[in-house]
């Protein structure tokens, strides 16, 4: 049997960069020092008005093919994770397949998940490889959450950034990804929700638990998300360790969705984790939803190959409410491949 192996990752960040200094000038009434202390976000990249998910997905993928010796014809499946697709119909992955010039024999599908999306994507890729359906998968994450957010929305504008990533998942002889563990609580769907972008009219939509203070299409209950994270993620970690036969102290890195600095620090305290094992690297890009874990891995790989041969745990959590984790050992030596 073949198993999924995580290979190279390429990242695309839009050209426009908005800093807390920009926001300080535009909104002098906002306490940017306090906001930065909570979020850990100094700057965020924002998609251009004429730049959308398919454009960013193509740019991340083309960068991958340029940076690494991967023939396009070797890709036999595209998985695209997004919650801000170009169109409800057709599938954005089909647009990307065509624009990249991939084989017409290549499978392609979108899946709609947010902060847990990368872990889910790895699971889907692992299933396709184990079943013999695919040998090389292009896993893409791409989001333009900024297009959901009103410019006066202090709670969201200061956190979310746009990005896209492209990862190669290859078939290998050794199991380096897994086991996986997932959870869902749809009762919390109204905790983070985008209004006015689907078929269901807003009059018949889920109502937010609290008054919407801003005109954004996106609504987030930050306090409830923090409670959710602190209640659901510690049990996930311990169950995943048990399932994988690994001790907590044997995990070198906890690669968590980069939600906010406050949330990750709170989780570390709740679980009594060594802060050195919980990297927080979102200062220059913000919360990029499903992109945050692959961006984190890319930064660590390029900064001294820090993930190579380490026992890591990826943990995604958020919108849905949805959460997932996976044990991972990085066998792709970025120093040797570049």
Image (cartoon, rainbow, N blue to C red):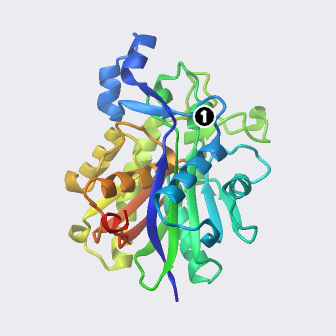
Rendered view: 27 above or below 110: above
Q: Quadrant of residue 6?
A: bottom left
Q: Which residue lies furthest to the bottom in this view?
A: 1
Q: Is residue 250 above or below residue 34?
A: below
Q: Where is residue 72 in the image (x, y as percent from the top left)?
A: 61, 65
Residue 249 appears at what percent x and percent y? 21, 68
Reply above or below: 290 against 137. Answer: above
Q: Position of residue 120 (x, y in %)?
A: 54, 63
Res 188 seen here: no
Residue 262 located left or right of residue 192: left
Assign the C terminus to one quadrant of the image. bottom left
For numbered disc 1, what is the local secondary structure?
loop
Q: Can residue 6 be seen in this view?
A: yes
Q: Nearer the viewer, residue 306 or 81?
A: 306
Q: Which residue is drawn at 62% across and 83% down?
A: 132
Q: Which quadrant of the structure image shows residue 133?
A: bottom right
Residue 308 lies, in percent from the top left, at: 29, 67
Residue designated by label 1: 208
Q: Nearer the viewer, residue 206 or 148?
A: 148
Say if 54 sits above or below 274 in the image. Answer: above
Say how many tags the image has.
1
Query: Is residue 310 shown left or right of residue 111?
Result: left
In the drawing, does residue 318 fall left or right of residue 106?
A: left
Q: Residues within 10 Å of mark 1 (few under 14, many from 20)?
A: some
Tell me which residue sits at (42%, 54%) in the image.
293
Residue ID at (49%, 36%):
161
């Amino acid at each position: 049997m073949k198993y999924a192996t995580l290979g190279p990752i390429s990242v695309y960040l839009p050209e426009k960069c908005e800093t807390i200094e920009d926001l300080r000038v535009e909104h002098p009434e906002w306490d940017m020092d306090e906001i930065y202390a909570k979020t850990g976000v100094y700057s965020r990249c924002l998609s251009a008005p004429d730049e959308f998910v398919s454009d960013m997905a193509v740019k991340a993928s083309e960068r991958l093919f340029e940076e690494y010796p991967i023939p396009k014809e070797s890709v036999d499946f595209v998985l695209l994770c997004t919650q801000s697709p170009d169109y409800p119909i057709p599938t954005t992955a089909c647009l990307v397949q065509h624009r990249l010039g991939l084989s017409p024999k290549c499978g392609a599908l979108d899946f709609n998940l947010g902060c847990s999306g990368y872990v889910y994507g790895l699971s889907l890729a692992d299933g396709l490889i184990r079943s013999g359906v695919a040998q090389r998968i292009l896993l893409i994450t791409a989001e333009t959450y900024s297009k959901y957010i009103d410019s006066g929305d202090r709670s969201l504008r200061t956190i979310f950034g746009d990005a896209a990533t492209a990862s190669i998942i290859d078939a290998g002889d050794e199991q380096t990804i897994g086991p996986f563990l997932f959870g869902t609580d749809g009762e919390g769907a109204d905790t983070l929700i985008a209004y006015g972008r689907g078929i269901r009219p807003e009059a018949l939509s889920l109502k937010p638990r609290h008054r919407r203070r801003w005109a954004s299409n996106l609504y987030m209950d930050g306090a409830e998300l923090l409670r959710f994270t602190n209640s659901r993620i510690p049990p996930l970690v311990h169950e995943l360790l048990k399932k994988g036969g690994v001790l907590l102290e044997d995990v070198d890195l906890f690669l968590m969705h980069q939600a906010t600095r406050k949330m990750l620090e709170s989780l570390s305290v709740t679980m009594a984790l060594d802060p050195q094992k919980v990297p927080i690297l979102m200062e220059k890009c913000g919360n990029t939803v499903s992109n945050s874990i692959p961006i984190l891995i890319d930064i660590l790989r390029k900064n001294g190959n820090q993930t190579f041969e380490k026992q890591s745990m990826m943990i995604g959590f958020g919108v849905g409410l949805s959460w997932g984790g996976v044990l991972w050992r990085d066998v792709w030596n970025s120093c040797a491949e570049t």
